[in-house]
Amino acid sequence: RKEVEQDPGPFNVPEGATVAFNCTYSNSASQSFFWYRQDCRKEPKLLMSVYSSGNEDGRFTAQLNRASQYISLLIRDSKLSDSATYLCVVNDMRFGAGTRLTVKP
Amino acid sequence: NAGVTQTPKFQVLKTGQSMTLQCAQDMNHNSMYWYRQDPGMGLRLIYYSASEGTTDKGEVPNGYNVSRLNKREFSLRLESAAPSQTSVYFCASSDRGYNTEAFFGQGTRLTVV
């Protein structure tokens, strides 16, 4: 089993939709969790950290479920500009393969 | 406002050639990383340097060597390039290791023919 696994998608959603991604991890001792965004042929950039109690940043909500060993990212009211690949990162800078999101008009 | 700078941005090598990818950061970060990204594979950690003077292997170190020249610079060397090393290479840095935000360079697109 890979250390970090994501559904590769692609997720194709209409503008205004709500979409959620999950990322599972295998190391139960993992302590740090992040979501990064990567636009086509660009470098990844931090979207948000994931805190134990869950956290929100505008239309984005990140949650951690330690019991089931996954983190999630919820995007509400999707915009065309949200189209990108979303990468989860767990602990020692291990990246998931990424989930591709396309938001369509 | 440079952040993390990688050179070159593009490179084509013949099998067996060697080259060094350069990376420099101006944010006074302690930790630096080299990744490769292949379609459908996400980013895989090649080597990292937790602090100046230390380097450690990541997930896919075979065929690569690194040098942490000083706090700013972390280079990746391919001694004898193979077609399997065709990939996009990213350098990154972070302030206090794994638990803090990593900043990435723009990537080097390497093709080995």
Image (cartoon, coloured by chain):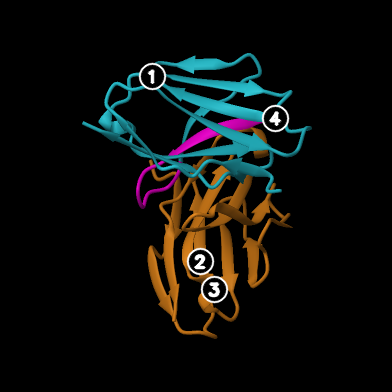
Chain colours: A cyan, B orange
Q: Amino acid at mark 4?
A: Gln
Callout 1–callout 3 Cβ contact below 8 Å: no
| Gap between marks 4 and 1 measured at Cα | 23 Å
| Gap between marks 1 and 3 measured at Cα | 40 Å
Q: Earlier in the sequence, mark 2 or mark 3?
A: 2
**A3 left or right of B76 in image:** right
Q: Nearer the viewer, mark 1 or mark 3?
A: 1
Q: Position of residue A34 (x, y in %)?
A: 57, 32
Disc 1: host chain? A
| Gap between marks 1 and 2 measured at Cα | 40 Å
Q: Is residue B95 visible?
A: no
Q: Amino acid at mark 2?
A: Leu
Q: Earlier in the sequence, mark 4 or mark 1?
A: 4
Instruction: For label 1, count other residues whose C-alpha is less than 10 Å away and answer few (under 14), some (14-19) or many (20+).
Output: some
Disc 2: host chain? B
Q: Position of residue B49 (x, y in %)?
A: 67, 52
Tell me the magenta residue range: A32-44
Q: Who is closer to the viewer here, A90 or A7? A: A7
- Give the residue at mark 1: A76
Residue A65 lies, with reference to residue B68, above or below; the image says above
Q: Amino acid at mark 1?
A: Arg
Instruction: For label 3, count other residues whose C-alpha is less than 10 Å away and answer few (under 14), some (14-19) or many (20+).
Output: few
Q: Nearer the viewer, mark 4 or mark 3?
A: 4
**B63 left or right of A20 in image:** right
Q: Position of residue A100 (x, y in %)?
A: 41, 42
Residue B113 lies, with reference to residue B47, above or below; the image says below
- Give the residue at mark 2: B21
**Residue at (72, 55) in percent of width and height:** B53
- Give the residue at mark 4: A69
